């Protein structure tokens, strides 16, 4: 396969990760095309764009077949990606003397709702409430965990949320925390009010990680054997301009 110069650099990095031990040569070529296409200017998430932007000489359907029916296991790919991400972030944290933040959030990849007559609707698409739109939208919802330290931030793990399954978004985040291997660097969980929950906080404490997150006004907490809502604390807090 004839590659462009930057594609050769991508291939060399994948070789350093020892992916050829787990992926065939055709699979490696597809991975290089996918990475090149997704990193190209103008990419919006379509397979046809990956094929065009990466200047792949093979027919577009070969890439679709690789994703849908190809004989490859993404387990090692996910494992090595998380390992390299953690190594890079921890190295940067030690160099800049900064803490590591584990950021949790979810996002929706909105799709066009198919006709009721469609024979092959997009797999796993459902209606999810979109805070930006203020209404349910049709598409895929993904829960993701990013790692950040100083001026570096990389995706660490992600999972597709399916309403028909028993695992909630909170449980998916807990699983990601459980799989994370904490190093000696100071580490904190950073999240919005949706993920600030007892289970997230306890999962973090089990790894020696504290949680920083927004708190909903209707959250119930117990203090000195009395039950309170978090909004009862609002009058106690006073805003002070930070000294930089």
Image (cartoon, rainbow, N blue to C red):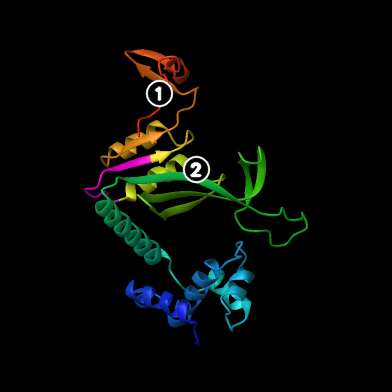
Foreground of the two, 21 or 54 = 54
Q: Residue furthest front?
A: 244
For label 1, count other residues whose C-alpha is less than 10 Å away and answer few (under 14), some (14-19) or many (20+). few
Residue 95: x, y in percent? 25, 54
Q: Magenta stretch containing residue 71, yes or no?
A: no
| Left or right of 54 in this view: 230 | left
- Determine which residue is flagged by label 2: 166
Q: Is residue 115 visible?
A: yes
Residue 5 x %, y %:
46, 81
Q: Magenta stretch: dominant SS?
A: loop
Q: Is residue 244 left or right of residue 111?
A: left
Q: Which mark is residue 30?
A: none
Q: Residues within 10 Å of mark 2 (few under 14, many from 20)?
A: few
Q: Earlier in the sequence, mark 2 or mark 1?
A: 2
Q: Residue at x 37, y 73 (%)?
A: 13
Q: Whole-Å distance between the Cαs marked 2 and 1? A: 43 Å
Q: Which mark is residue 240?
A: 1
Residue 231, image x, y percentages = 47, 18
Residue 182 is inside the magenta segment: yes
In the image, residue 153 lies at what x, y percent?
40, 53
| Furthest residue in direction left, as rendered | 184
> Residue visible at 38% across and 51% down?
147
Q: Is residue 207 above or below residue 181?
A: above
Which quarter of the figure has residue 163? top right
| Element at label 1 | loop
Label 2 SS: loop
Magenta-colored span? 181-189
Closer-to-camera residue (190/63)? 190
Q: Quadrant of residue 73?
A: bottom left
Position of 139 with respect to 96 (left or right) is right
Q: Is residue 225 above or below residue 134?
A: above
Q: Quadrant of the C terminus?
A: top left
């Amino acid at each position: 396969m004839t590659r462009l110069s930057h594609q050769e650099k991508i291939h060399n990095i994948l070789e350093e990760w020892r992916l050829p031990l787990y992926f065939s040569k055709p699979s490696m070529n597809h991975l290089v095309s996918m990475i090149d296409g997704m990193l190209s200017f103008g990419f919006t998430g379509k397979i046809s764009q990956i094929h065009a932007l990466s200047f792949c000489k093979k027919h577009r359907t070969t890439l679709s077949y690789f994703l849908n029916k190809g004989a490859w296991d993404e387990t090692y790919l996910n494992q090595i990606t998380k390992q390299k991400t953690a190594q890079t972030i921890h190295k940067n944290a030690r160099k800049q003397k900064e803490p590591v933040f584990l950021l949790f959030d979810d996002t929706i990849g909105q799709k066009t709702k198919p006709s009721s007559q469609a024979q092959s609707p997009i797999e796993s698409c459902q209606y999810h409430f979109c805070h930006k739109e203020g209404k349910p939208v049709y598409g895929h919802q993904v829960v993701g965990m990013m790692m950040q330290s100083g001026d570096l931030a990389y995706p660490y793990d992600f999972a597709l949320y399916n309403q028909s399954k028993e695992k909630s978004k909170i449980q998916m985040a807990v699983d990601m925390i459980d799989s994370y291997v904490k190093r000696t660097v100071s580490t904190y969980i950073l999240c919005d009010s949706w993920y600030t929950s007892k289970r997230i906080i306890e999962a973090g404490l089990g790894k020696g990680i504290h949680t920083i997150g927004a708190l909903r006004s209707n959250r119930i907490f117990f203090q000195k054997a009395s039950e309170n809502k978090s909004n009862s604390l609002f009058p106690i807090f006073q805003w002070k301009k930070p000294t930089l």
